[in-house]
C-alpha cells in the first residue's frame, strides 16, 4: 500500500515539473511536424517500379517516428528521475519521510512505479500519434505495433532503473552525466554491431554484444525496430538506427527484465546503507 502511495505522489510530482511540460510541448510540436512531413511526402511521392512503394516509404517514416519517440522518452526518463534519491537527500525531504513507518525499499519501488507510469503514458500517446498519422495519410498500419510500443517502454524502464540506482550512489549532476553518457555509449555500440554484421567484422560485432550486455537499451530498441518491419523480403538492412541488419534474439527481453530487477535490487541495497 505504501508503495502505491509513493508511486501516486511521484507521478503527480513529476507532472508539476517545468521540464516535463517543456518536453510535452516539444513532443506536441514534433507530432505536428511529423504529420505535416508525412503529408508532404505523400503528395510528392512517385512510384519507382515495383520496389519503392508508399508502404515501404511509410515503413521508414513510422520507424523514424518510433526512433524519435524512443530517444525523447529516454532523455525525459533520465532527467526526470536523475535526482530521485540524491536530490531528495540534498533537499532534506527524505529526513522527514523515513521517520514514518515506511521501508526504504518501498520508497525506491514506489518512485520507480510512479515514473514508469508517466513514461509509459507518454510513449503510448506519442506512438498513437505516429500510428494515427500513418493510418490517415498513408493508409498504413505496421505489424506488431503493440509489441513495438511495449519494447520502447522497456527501453525507458531500463534507463529509469539505471538512473534510480545511480541516484543512490552519485550526486544529482554526476548521475545525469554518467547515465546520459552510458545511454550514448549503448547507441554507439549498437551501430558498431550492425556495421560489423554488415561488413562481417567480428571485432565490431563483439564490441556491440558486450555493450548490449552492459546496457541493453539499444538492443531492445533494435528489436522494436525489427518487429515494426513486415516479414517480407523488403527490409532495411544497413547500419542506421531504424535498420535491422540482424534482428536481436527475443531472449534479450528476458535479459532486459532481469537487468531492471537487478538494478532495482542494487538501488535498494545501496539506499539502505546510505546516510541521510
Image (cartoon, rainbow, N blue to C red):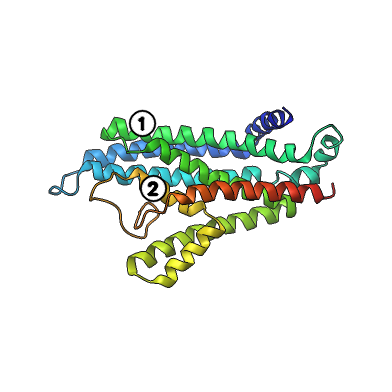
Q: Nearer the viewer, residue 274 or 63?
A: 274
| Residue 108 falls left or right of residue 212 | right
- The image position of residue 224, as x and y in percent, is 41, 46
Residue under label 1, please give it: 132
| Residue 135 falls left or right of residue 82 | left
The reply to whether the C-beta atoms of the residues labelled 1 and 2 are less than 8 Å apart is no
Work out whether residue 68 can be spotted.
Answer: yes
Of marks 1 and 2, the one in the foreground: 2
Whichever of callouts 1 and 2 sits on the residue coming sooner in the sequence is 1
- The image position of residue 263, as x and y in percent, is 64, 50
Count residues near mark 1 (Cα–Cα under 10 Å), then give few for <14, some for 14-19, many for 20+: some
- The image position of residue 218, as x and y in percent, is 48, 53
Q: Residue 138 falls in which quadrant of the image?
A: top left
Seen at 53% across and 59% down, the residue is 213
Residue 45 - label: none
Q: Secondary structure at mark 2?
A: helix
Count residues near mark 2 (Cα–Cα under 10 Å), then give few for <14, some for 14-19, many for 20+: many
Residue 225 - label: 2
Seen at 30% across and 30% down, the residue is 136
Q: Nearer the viewer, residue 23 or 190?
A: 190
Seen at 58% across and 34% down, the residue is 118
Seen at 41% across and 35% down, the residue is 146
Amino acid at each position: 500500500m505504501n508503495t502505491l502511495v509513493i508511486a501516486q505522489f511521484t507521478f503527480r510530482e513529476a507532472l508539476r515539473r517545468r521540464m516535463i511540460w517543456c518536453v510535452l510541448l516539444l513532443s506536441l510540436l514534433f507530432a505536428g511536424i511529423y504529420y505535416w512531413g508525412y503529408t508532404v511526402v505523400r503528395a510528392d511521392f512517385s512510384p519507382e517500379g515495383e520496389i519503392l512503394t508508399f508502404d515501404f516509404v511509410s515503413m521508414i517514416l513510422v520507424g523514424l517516428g518510433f526512433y524519435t519517440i524512443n530517444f525523447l522518452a529516454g532523455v525525459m526518463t533520465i532527467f526526470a528521475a536523475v535526482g530521485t534519491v540524491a536530490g531528495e537527500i540534498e533537499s532534506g525531504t527524505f529526513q522527514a519521510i523515513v521517520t514514518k513507518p515506511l521501508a526504504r525499499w518501498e520508497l525506491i519501488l514506489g518512485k520507480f512505479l510512479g515514473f514508469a507510469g508517466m513514461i509509459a503514458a507518454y510513449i503510448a500517446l506519442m506512438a498513437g500519434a505516429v500510428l494515427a498519422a500513418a493510418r490517415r495519410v498513408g493508409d498504413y498500419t505496421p505489424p506488431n505495433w503493440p509489441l513495438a510500443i511495449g519494447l520502447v517502454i522497456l527501453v525507458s524502464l531500463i534507463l529509469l532503473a539505471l538512473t534510480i540506482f545511480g541516484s543512490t550512489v552519485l550526486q544529482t549532476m554526476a548521475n545525469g552525466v554518467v547515465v546520459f553518457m552510458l545511454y550514448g555509449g549503448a547507441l554507439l555500440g549498437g551501430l558498431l554491431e550492425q556495421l560489423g554484421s554488415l561488413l562481417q567484422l567480428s571485432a565490431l560485432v563483439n564490441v556491440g554484444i558486450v555493450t548490449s550486455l552492459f546496457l541493453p537499451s539499444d538492443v531492445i530498441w533494435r528489436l522494436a525496430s525489427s518487429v515494426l518491419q513486415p516479414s517480407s523480403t523488403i527490409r532495411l538492412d544497413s547500419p542506421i538506427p531504424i535498420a535491422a541488419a540482424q534482428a536481436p534474439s527475443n531472449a534479450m527481453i528476458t535479459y532486459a527484465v532481469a537487468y531492471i530487477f537487478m538494478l532495482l535490487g542494487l538501488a535498494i541495497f545501496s539506499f539502505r546503507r546510505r546516510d541521510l
